[in-house]
Image: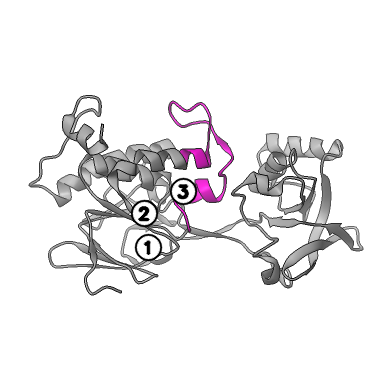
Amino acid sequence: MSDEPIKTDMIIVGAGPVGLFAVFEAGLLGLKCHLIDNLDRPGGQCTELYPEKPIYDIPARPKVTGQQLVDDLMEQISPFDAQFHLSQQAESLTQLDCGDWIMETTAGVELQAPIIVVAAGAGSFVPKKPPYKDIDLYEENSIDYAVHKMEKYRDKELIIVGGGDSALDWVMALQPIAKKITLVHRREGFRAAPDSVSQVKQMVADDKIDFVIGNVKELIGEDGVLNSVGIDPIDGGRIHVNCDYLMPFVGLKISLGPIAHWGLNLNKKHIMVDHETFATDVDGIYAIGDVCSYPGKIKLILTGFYEAAVMCHSSFKYAFPDRKMATGYTTTNTAIQERLGV
């Protein structure tokens, strides 16, 4: 750890789409940002959970995948030289006499800024790990809890475990390219969108995928690479299914982590904010995106984009009352255009 903290204007906890757009809005106002995220890349849930799943409600984008949206946001913020601190959590938070905040991450990075923005989405999340014997032996090579590149699974034999939206979505997305897909769920019914359930049931009826009602009980392989999986159907016995990749989609564990201990006004793991400024009840700390709550809140990415814009203007006035704020349109304001490099 360095002797002096890294000074910046705004520290953003969470590098999902809303956190990334906050960098853009802050950059237009001349504010520098550092971002902290417990994932190993920017993008949040869009990158981790549905990088190749289409999103249909982003303004002016009839259809865009989660990863495309993140890639475009990264390009959009490129003029502002945001600094990322990935694979670490925001941990301790203390306030200096001057009003600035000192934030330390779990990797020992110390940052100082007058503005803290919590854009942590639903919080820090990790996939639920099923209690399979020896699962740790195969995680590096043969077990995936998320899909990052579909091409990885071309002509492979896959076993997908789960009965929710994530499991069924990936069954439908991967079936055209995989050699074989076996869907395993502990019961016949699914907890997913009715249209997805209908499509998957039709795929089973058409012999496009195999469906086993039962539980995974045995992982078989060598040197950390799976060869097959033993499954116990509910009607008894054990079957062994060839397997290149086992993909358990059995839910996520979500927690605010250290944020829950920062003294903010929480309501069921959501941070209550003033909807006119997106300020919390602690001066200098703001919250935007799915993590924040207020009357009339709608949980959409586009709502988070709006919240980011309003938050940046209100936090600028709070932290830098003596500075002139560049306002207006990107099409006409020359100061904003200079910051954008256009």
Question: In the depicted view, which residue is nearer to us: 296 or 136?
Answer: 136
Quarter of the image for residue 312 reads top left
Q: Which residue is mark 1?
A: 259
Residue drawn at 70 percent across, 48 percent down = 153
- Relative horizontal placement of residue 214, taking residue 161 as reference (left or right): right
Tell me which label, 3 or 1, sits earlier in the chain: 3
Tag 3 and tag 2, C-beta contact below 8 Å: no
Residue drawn at 41 percent across, 36 percent down = 302
Instruction: State whether residue 276 appears in this view.
Output: no
Span colored in magenta: 40-69
- Relative horizontal placement of residue 242, taking residue 195 as reference (left or right): right
Q: Residue 248, relative to residue 64: is it above or below? A: below
Residue drawn at 46 percent across, 32 percent down = 58
| Rendered image: mark on residue 271 | 2
Comparing labels 3 and 2, the label whose residue is closer to the camera = 3
Disc 2 from disc 1: Cα separation: 10 Å
Q: Amino acid at mark 1?
A: Ile
Q: Amino acid at mark 2?
A: Ile
Q: Which residue is mark 3?
A: 43
Tag 2 and tag 1, C-beta contact below 8 Å: yes
